[in-house]
Image (spheres, rainbow, N blue to C red):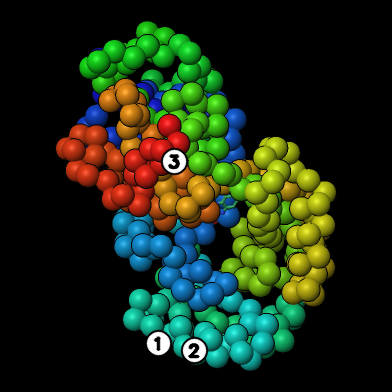
Amino acid sequence: MLDYIIVGFGLSGLSFVERLEKEGKTYIVFEDGSQKSSRVAGGLYNPVILKRFTAAWQAVEQLEKAVPFYQSIEAKLNKKLIFPLPIYRRFNSVEEQNTWFEACDKPVLERFLSANLLTNSNTGLDIPYHFGEVKGTGRIDIQQMLSLYLQYIDTKESLKKEVFEYDQLQIEKEYVVYKGFQARHIVFCEGFGVKNNPFFNYLPLVGNKGEYLIIKSEKLKLNEAVKSSVFIIPLRNDLYKVGATYNNKDKTPEITTEAKEELQKKLNTVLRAPYEVVDQVSGIRPTVRDRRPLLGTHPVHKNVHILNGLGSRGILIGPTVGEHLFNFIEQGTPLEPSISIERFKELR
Ligand SMILES: Cc1cc2nc3c(=O)[nH]c(=O)nc-3n(C[C@H](O)[C@H](O)[C@H](O)COP(=O)(O)OP(=O)(O)OC[C@H]3O[C@@H](n4cnc5c(N)ncnc54)[C@H](O)[C@@H]3O)c2cc1C
């Protein structure tokens, strides 16, 4: 008898599995590669909403949990995965600069927003006003982290690289059985893939498609992420991620020429250095109608659970909600109403 079956290994699956590891629980993971949100993400952790200069929902508390969480994964996998990276917000007007100064004085933001505006010295960029610097931010190499973590659980023989077939799940009162694996609980962490899940597809997960371009620019030489109408995120070897788009109509996994054109148009307003597009990626963010995560237990089956709805900020939210769901299942610690699936009980 295992403790858990986990379906899906993006940022939500990883957050829960890491909690299981810390608590000495046994598990098996099913992962079929059907969703790409975590694997294509920009990897930025940033508690500030850069459109309005406000703090994102519970982001400061989440950041305090997230950094040590990823540090302990770095140590476990013996690989550098966290890259501190300031974000430079390009201002479009003097009014915007003034709004920034007002935000700098707000108690929750003062440690993140620098009151010293920066003048651009990079000839590869077109910056008509100043930059505002966001501090305490960084990038996680999510792709590397997920792939190394999957290798790690594979060596423990705790990974099945296959589609989870919902109709094969047998649910008993005290345990579940799936293709010969018996476990006390099952947790679904499928991101947008939950749309195919008959236990939880009543939940209002909307989904928002995001695409990035990967560009190469030898002349740009950026050491920080620049945010204008798009993000330019330095990777390595003169490569940069540019994006992302937000599209809540198209739910197909393919990359599109519309997104490429939109991103290049925006990029061309800020980039003077020559560049070439070398790749394009896309994924569907698991966004929810009310922009909050989805955690909880199936209304009828007490050993069937969900961890989803990480939206566009999975890096920060994941470690906190992984812990909340674990404490809820194992210790009965109540979930905050704003993240519990109970808030959608009228949709069942
Ligand atoms: C373009 C883009 C940029 C982003 N940038 C950032 C960023 O910079 N910072 C940030 O914090 N967040 C970012 N995000 C958001 C972040 O990626 C999401 O919050 C996060 O990926 C959600 O993780 P998840 O594990 O819930 O979903 P997913 O990553 O979609 O993972 C679900 C997993 O379940 C698997 N699965 C599904 N169904 C089944 C099944 N039946 N059987 C087996 N396996 C199954 C899928 O293959 C997948 O691996 C971005 C997202 C996108 C799309």
Q: Mark 2 is on which residue type?
A: Phe
Q: Residue furthest top?
A: 180
Identify residue type, mark 3.
Answer: Asn
Instruction: Give coordinates of residue 181: x percent, y percent.
Output: 35, 13
Question: Measured from the top left, where is residue 88 in percent x and y?
Answer: 57, 76
Q: Position of residue 20 (x, y in %)?
A: 28, 35
| Residue drawn at x 25%, y 15% as measured from the top left | 173
User: Label 1 belongs to which residue?
Assistant: 105
State yes or no: discs 3 and 2 in contact (Cβ < 8 Å): no
Query: Label 2, on which residue?
Result: 101
Residue 128: image quadrant is bottom right
Amino acid at the residue labelled 1: Asp
CA distance separating discs 3 and 1? 34 Å
For residue 33, side relative to residue 155 (left or right): right
Which residue corresponds to the image point at 46% horizontal and 74% vertical from the top-left? 54
Q: Please tell me which residue is depicted at 45% across the width and 36% down the height of the picture.
A: 347
